[in-house]
């Protein structure tokens, strides 16, 4: 009888120990970020497609982004996009891997090939993810639009930046961004923000079909990368990097193969 009690206590002890250890492991997993940009990391870009089944496209997809935009393979087409943005309430969020400006309500939309894509959010990558003729720039901003009823549900407008004068639009967000350095998931109210204040540049832009540049790397994304390169100060780039330093000192995905995809230069007034 005493031996049976001893065995029962021993089994209970190991069960409690196992449960405690499992709980600790689960908490550690919860606290870890889902992915990062470090080249040799177990959660870096080379491993994204192996981490979750729904992320498989990151490794096996044939239309992945970013790519190099080379003038040698660009086809010139006259078909301008139409942007209709509105003043709307917005928040700034530290998402860990980037700083995101998110609009809440109707911030307007962009019209692409007859389909309207409402604006959802904008975020920044440093250095730039896309390159032009092999050149990588200081930063790249993505304006993400979504239409759940469209065949291609996501449309992203990308703006490239080189070092120079400060970007006036980003300057308005400096105080909010400065207050959330290393504070993942921190959210600040940015007030009413008009997307029109984002200086995009000329009406010329590169267009191709690609993917999201973060997991799950969803394909079928309509990319419009503005040809005109804007300027941003070194201090602004430094701040955006510092804000997510613990998670991503650099948050640009490596270049992806073109795989014979066509790249177009949409130039109003040009002939096809």
Image: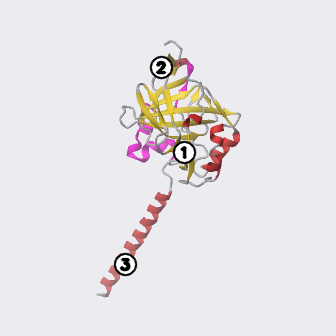
Could you tell me which residue is drawn at 52 percent across and 20 percent down? 265
Q: Secondary structure at mark 1?
A: strand
Find residue 139 and report its horizontal and vertical position in percent: 61, 36
Answer yes or no: is residue 98 visible: no
Label count reads: 3
Q: Indicate left or right for 111 with 40 as reference.
A: left
Q: Earlier in the sequence, mark 3 or mark 1?
A: 3
Magenta-colored stretch includes residue 70? yes
Q: Which mark is residue 79?
A: 2
Give the label, 2 or 3, closer to the camera: 2
Which circle marks residue 87 in the picture? Answer: none
Of residues 209 and 92, the one drawn nearer to the viewer in this rendering: 92
Kindly identify which residue carries mark 3.
10
* Label 3 secondary element: helix
Residue at image mark 1: 100
Residue positioned most to the top: 271
Query: Over which residues does the magenta segment extend?
Result: 43-71
- Residue 239 shows in the view: yes
Q: Residue furthest bottom?
A: 2
Q: Nearer the viewer, residue 261 or 233?
A: 233
Q: Position of residue 163 (x, y in %)?
A: 69, 34
Q: In what quadrant of the picture does the N terminus appear?
A: bottom left
Task: Indicate whether 71 appears above or below 103.
Answer: above
Residue at 54% from the left image edge and 32% from the top image edge: 158
């Amino acid at each position: 009888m005493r031996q049976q009690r001893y065995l029962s206590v021993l089994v209970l002890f190991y069960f409690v120990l196992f449960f405690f250890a499992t709980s600790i492991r689960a908490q550690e997993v919860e606290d870890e970020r889902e992915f990062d940009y470090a080249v040799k990391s177990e959660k870096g870009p080379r491993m994204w497609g192996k981490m979750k089944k729904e992320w498989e496209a990151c490794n096996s997809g044939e239309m992945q982004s970013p790519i190099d935009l080379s003038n040698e393979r660009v086809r010139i087409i006259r078909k301008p996009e139409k942007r209709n943005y509105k003043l709307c309430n917005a928040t700034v969020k530290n998402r860990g891997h980037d700083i995101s400006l998110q609009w809440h309500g109707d911030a307007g939309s962009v019209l692409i090939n007859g389909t309207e894509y409402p604006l959802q959010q904008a975020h920044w990558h440093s250095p730039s993810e896309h390159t032009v003729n092999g050149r990588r720039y200081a930063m790249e901003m993505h304006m993400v639009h979504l239409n759940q009823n469209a065949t291609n549900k996501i449309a992203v407008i990308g703006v490239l930046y080189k070092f120079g004068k400060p970007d006036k639009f980003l300057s308005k967000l400096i105080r909010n961004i400065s207050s959330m350095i290393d504070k993942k998931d921190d959210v600040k109210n940015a007030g009413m923000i008009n997307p029109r204040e984002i200086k995009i540049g000329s009406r010329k832009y590169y267009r191709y079909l690609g993917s999201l540049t973060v997991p799950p790397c969803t394909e079928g994304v309509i990319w419009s990368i503005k040809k005109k390169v804007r300027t941003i100060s070194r201090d602004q780039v430094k701040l955006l990097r510092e804000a997510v330093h613990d998670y991503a000192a650099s948050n640009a995905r490596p270049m992806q193969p073109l795989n014979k995809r066509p790249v177009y230069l949409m130039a109003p007034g040009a002939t096809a």
